[in-house]
């Protein structure tokens, strides 16, 4: 007999429909999976056989052929397990599909349990778009799949549950099937599964635990202002400063300042989290991602890839912030990989059998010391690096990358009077409110485009420079020897400063203030 | 036999002094043994090659050194080579035989037998020369102090002498040139590659407004030994030496010691007690007859220059601070006033002026465009007219920063 079921696979961030065909014919007992399976999928054979038996069914002693269509796409992973197993049960006539059509997702364990898989959100959306009304997913993926509207989602724990769903209320054998309890030797209940894969990075979402409250940040008025401007306009920001000046502390205030995601953005972020195997926060709004990977992070982790093509950190930070502490300590090719995402907001992974393009419109906040010893340019402590070392250290971060960072600010160490001063700094909430207003103004003006992404004519229109502002800009460009790219950078930042002050047009003061946020004195060397 | 003319003797003198292995002491002994350089070269060249080093050592009464006689014989064959090499670089050579030899070097106990130079030899006999020295690894404050001292000296018509090293030396040289003054750099190696590579451009600029000199012929690279030796020339050329910032064991302390031994005035910036960056300064103040450097005006008084008319100035700094401040309004004036009291961070200016960072930042850019402020890392330094606060501006700025804007204005206007 032949059984045909629908399931799905993730490609990039989109789901694709996959049809599972199971045929059982007389012949030498055995199971053959065709349709370009890779090694991990060939192992499905063994999982499926044990799961069927341990769930209380019989594994047919016949010739079993499983075809995964379309046949020209390489198949990977364990998400087809449930569909294959149910296909075998149907084809061997142990159950009948009298419960109506179901789309099935899930991985099997040997005891017949159904394990969660990644990418449920886009897969369920694809199945819905293909006309499916009912989808069966692993219980642990139930909430995530529930984010898709217009489709009935059922979460299951074991293959026996799936069989009961498919067979409907009249399926007797299915109703009688019971999973056998495994013999447990260790007391540990938690088996590492895909959904705890999120170990890398530090995705702060929703939870307030690791933010910095700005009211706790003493001094650093200048840098706080720079951070406010950066977030209000989604400008990339570089914090330069001696050890202990508070760069990391300040950067970690960003999650408390970011405006919330809009509907469309929230959906994209949820899909990325699903495909990356990160848990979906339940019961609260999805926050903007804030990722702070360590400087030993590899190229594949940042950009994405791996055998299963997972989205990397630049994609996980889509619509949020990627914070790179100790920027100069990252590998050079890891940093250079940031150039494409910073430029187009996407990242492309090209493989022999095709390419995937992930969205990666993240805001970069980076922090670094000005030199190896950390004290170059400090007012009161001498730098002990060899003469050219500070320059060399800055140059570890390539020019093209620095070029894409609109804002840079040098943070001095605090002196004691600031640390013990009585004045209570402004709390995050009131700064965030100001940012929100500036943000809304910018988006309303430029059709949903934050100032940091304005280019060309759009930028000129948004700035609406009058005669005197134009003259100031020309004077700044000449006096500070700005390149054309830098002039645009100054204009973008000036636009945001004006938004924070609720000004319709960018004036001279905003241009002068913006120009101060691109100091390059530390890159020029000690001679001058 | 060479004709014994003054020119011939001068050539032999330069040649002998430039011979590898011949330092002050050997040169002195060679002269003392044979009376003049020409005779000495001829005599050494006639020694039998096999035992020349031993015989030479016996004759001049120094320890035997292998290869010394051979080196002198090479020089004797062509004593004009070092001077020709120097002329090819566009430079010049001075010896104590020349009338242009600076009198200040005659006063030295062990004067260099020869000085090679680029630029203007006249700069070595300038009426007023002051050495500004310090560490290669300055703090931001040290660097900015060197800049202010260098600029102020140049404005008072003083030639700033230093060693062309990175750090304090470089900052002082550069400030003097930027203020339109002259500078003299004394380097440890040959003048084909003067000073550290990062200062090649600065060296050329100094040669254009003063001179770069060395006691080493071209082709000689500086060694650990040549730096302390050139320091004695730095201090000897100058009538006073100013130590800006010196940690313990800094080379600047050697210059300071030479200055004291040569009977020169020594000014030392005090710095903060216990601060390792100025440990050398503090030791000098405690253990030597150095005077503390307490202010730029007081510095000129100590140097005996307080009655001097200001020297050359670069265009745009013809304004006094008070006049310059009057051309500004509102927050820019407040920021400029605070900055004229000394280098500040943006946060410092935010506190001093009571203006938000955005406003202070805009004002700083404006001042930078006018050439009245500079940036170094987190520090913003006053420049141009803001460097030169006339008496009274200190109090005025202080009053304004204290929150009493009106009294500040009144004093500014007076």
Image (cartoon, rainbow, N blue to C red):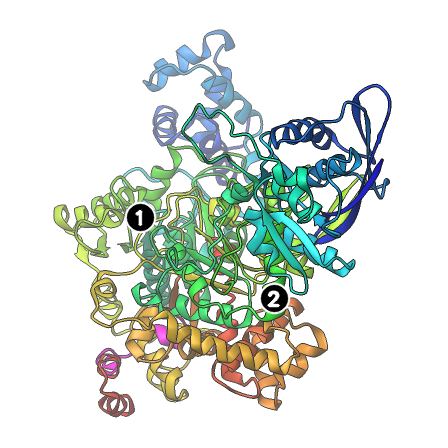
Q: Residue B172: x percent and y percent?
A: 38, 58
Residue position marked by numbered label 2 in the rendering = A265
Q: Please give the range of residues in magenta.
A: B383-396
Compared to residue A7, the image places residue A481 above or below, namely below
Disc number lying in front (2 or 1) = 2
Q: Is residue A188 or residue A346 the one in the foreground? A: A188
> Where B181 falls versus A303 (above or below)?
below
Please say whether residue A23 is visible from this viewpoint: yes
Q: x%, y% of residue B386?
A: 36, 76
Q: Indicate the secondary structure of the residue bearing disc 2.
A: helix
Real-space Cα separation, disc 2 to disc 1, in angstroms:
73 Å
**Depth order, front residue of B412/A450:** A450
Pointer 2 chain: A
- Asked whether, in this view, residue B278 is left or right of residue B67, the answer is left
Question: Could you tell whether B161 is left or right of A174 in the image?
Answer: left
- Residue B236: give its label: 1
Q: Find numbered disc 1 in the image and state the secondary structure of the residue it sits on.
A: helix
Residue reaching furthest top?
Answer: B50
* Quadrant containing the C terminus of chain B in the rendered view: bottom left
- Label 1 resides on the chain identified as B
Does the segment drawn in magenta span residue A367? no
At 35% from the left and 80% from the top, the residue drawn is B355
Kindly indicate whether the residues beneath marks 2 and 1 are on one polypeptide chain: no
Q: Quadrant of residue A49?
A: top right
**Where on the picture, by quarter, is residue B295?**
bottom left
Indicate left or right for B369 with A242 as reference: right
Mark 2: few/some/many CA within 10 Å (<14, 14-19, 20+): some
Labelled pair 2, 1 in contact (Cβ < 8 Å): no
When the figure is inspected, residue B144 is found, relative to residue A489, above or below; the finding is above
Counting the numbered discs, the total is 2
């Amino acid at each position: 007999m032949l059984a045909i079921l629908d399931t799905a696979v993730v490609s990039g961030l989109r789901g694709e429909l996959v049809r599972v065909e199971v045929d059982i014919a007389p012949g030498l007992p055995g199971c053959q999976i065709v349709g370009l399976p890779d090694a991990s999928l060939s192992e499905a054979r063994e999982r499926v056989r044990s799961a069927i038996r341990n769930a209380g069914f019989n594994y047919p002693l016949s010739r079993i052929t499983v075809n995964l269509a379309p046949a020209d796409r390489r198949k990977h992973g364990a998400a087809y397990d449930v569909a294959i197993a149910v296909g075998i049960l149907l084809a061997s006539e142990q159950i009948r599909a009298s419960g109506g059509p179901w789309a099935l997702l899930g991985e099997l364990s040997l005891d017949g349990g159904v394990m969660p898989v990644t990418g449920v959100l886009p897969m369920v959306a694809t199945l819905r778009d293909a006309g499916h009304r009912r989808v069966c997913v692993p219980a642990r993926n139930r909430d995530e799949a529930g984010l898709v509207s217009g489709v009935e989602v059922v979460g299951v724990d074991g293959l026996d549950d799936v069989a009961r769903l498919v067979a409907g209320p009249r399926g007797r054998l299915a109703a009688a099937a019971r999973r056998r309890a495994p013999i447990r030797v260790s007391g540990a209940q938690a088996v590492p599964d895909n959904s705890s894969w999120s170990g890398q990075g530090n995705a702060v979402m929703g939870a307030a635990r690791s933010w910095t409250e700005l009211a706790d940040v003493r001094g650093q008025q200048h840098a706080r202002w720079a951070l406010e401007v950066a977030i209000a306009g989604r400008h990339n920001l570089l914090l330069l400063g001696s050890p202990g000046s508070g760069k990391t502390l300040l950067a970690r205030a960003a999650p408390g300042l970011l405006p919330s995601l809009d509907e469309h953005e929230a959906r994209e972020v949820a899909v990325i989290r699903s495909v990356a195997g990160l848990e979906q926060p339940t019961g609260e709004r999805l926050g903007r991602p804030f990722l702070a990977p360590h400087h030993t992070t590899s190229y594949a982790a940042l950009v994405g890839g791996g055998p299963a093509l997972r989205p990397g950190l630049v994609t996980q930070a889509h619509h949020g912030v990627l914070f790179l502490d100790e920027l100069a300590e990252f590998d050079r090719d890891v940093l250079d990989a940031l150039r494409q995402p910073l430029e187009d907001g996407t990242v492309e992974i090209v493989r022999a059998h095709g390419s995937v393009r992930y969205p990666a419109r993240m805001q970069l906040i980076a922090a670094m010391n000005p030199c190896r010893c950390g004290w170059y340019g400090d007012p009161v402590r001498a730098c002990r690096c060899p003469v050219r070392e500070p320059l060399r250290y800055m140059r570890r971060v390539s020019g093209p990358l620095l070029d894409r960072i609109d804002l840079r600010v040098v943070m001095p160490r605090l002196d004691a009077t600031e640390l013990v001063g009585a004045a209570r700094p402004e709390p995050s909430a009131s700064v965030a409110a100001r940012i929100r207003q500036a943000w809304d103004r910018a988006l309303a003006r430029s059709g949903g485009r934050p100032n940091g992404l304005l280019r060309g004519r759009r930028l000129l229109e948004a700035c609406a420079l009058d005669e005197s502002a134009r003259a100031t800009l020309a004077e700044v460009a000449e006096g500070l020897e700005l390149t054309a790219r830098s002039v645009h950078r100054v204009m973008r930042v000036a636009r945001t400063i004006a938004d924070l002050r609720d000004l319709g047009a960018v004036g001279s003061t905003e241009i002068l203030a913006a120009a101060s946020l691109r100091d390059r004195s530390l890159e020029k060397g000690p001679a001058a | 036999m060479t004709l014994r003319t003054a020119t011939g003797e001068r050539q032999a003198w330069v040649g002998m002094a430039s011979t590898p292995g011949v330092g002050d002491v050997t040169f002195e002994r060679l002269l003392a043994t044979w009376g003049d350089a020409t005779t000495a070269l001829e005599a050494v060249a006639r020694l039998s090659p096999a035992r020349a080093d031993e015989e030479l050592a016996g004759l001049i009464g120094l320890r035997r050194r292998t290869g010394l006689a051979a080196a002198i014989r090479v020089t004797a064959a062509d004593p004009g080579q070092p001077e020709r090499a120097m002329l090819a670089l566009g430079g010049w050579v001075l010896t104590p035989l020349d009338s242009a030899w600076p009198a200040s070097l005659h006063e030295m106990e062990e004067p260099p037998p020869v000085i090679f130079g680029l630029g203007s030899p006249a700069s070595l006999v300038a009426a007023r020369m002051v050495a500004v020295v310090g560490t290669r690894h300055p703090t931001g404050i040290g660097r900015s102090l060197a800049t202010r001292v260098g600029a102020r000296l140049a404005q008072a018509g003083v030639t700033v002498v230093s060693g062309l090293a990175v750090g304090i030396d470089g900052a002082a040289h550069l400030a003097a040139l930027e203020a339109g003054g002259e500078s003299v750099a004394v380097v440890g190696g040959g003048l084909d590659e003067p000073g550290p590579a990062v200062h090649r451009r600065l060296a050329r600029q100094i040669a254009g407004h003063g001179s770069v000199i060395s006691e080493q012929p071209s082709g000689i690279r500086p060694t650990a030994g040549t730096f302390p030796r050139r320091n004695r020339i730095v201090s000897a050329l100058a009538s006073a030496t100013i130590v800006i910032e010196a940690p313990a064991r800094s080379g600047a302390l050697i210059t300071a010691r030479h200055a004291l031994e040569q009977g020169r005035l020594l000014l030392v910036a005090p710095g903060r007690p216990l601060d390792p960056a100025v440990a050398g300064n503090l030791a000098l103040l405690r253990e030597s007859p150095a005077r503390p450097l307490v202010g730029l005006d007081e510095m000129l008084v100590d140097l005996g220059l307080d009655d001097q008319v200001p020297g050359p100035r670069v265009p745009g700094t013809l304004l006094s601070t008070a006049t310059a401040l009057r051309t500004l309004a509102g927050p820019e004036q407040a920021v400029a006033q605070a900055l004229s009291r000394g280098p500040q961070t943006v946060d410092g200016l935010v506190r001093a002026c009571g203006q938000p960072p955005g406003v202070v930042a805009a004002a700083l850019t404006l001042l930078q465009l006018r050439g009245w402020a500079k940036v170094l890392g987190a520090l913003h330094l006053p420049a141009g007219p803001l460097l030169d606060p006339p008496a009274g501006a200190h109090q005025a700025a202080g009053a304004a920063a204290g929150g009493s804007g009106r009294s500040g204005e009144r004093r500014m206007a007076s």
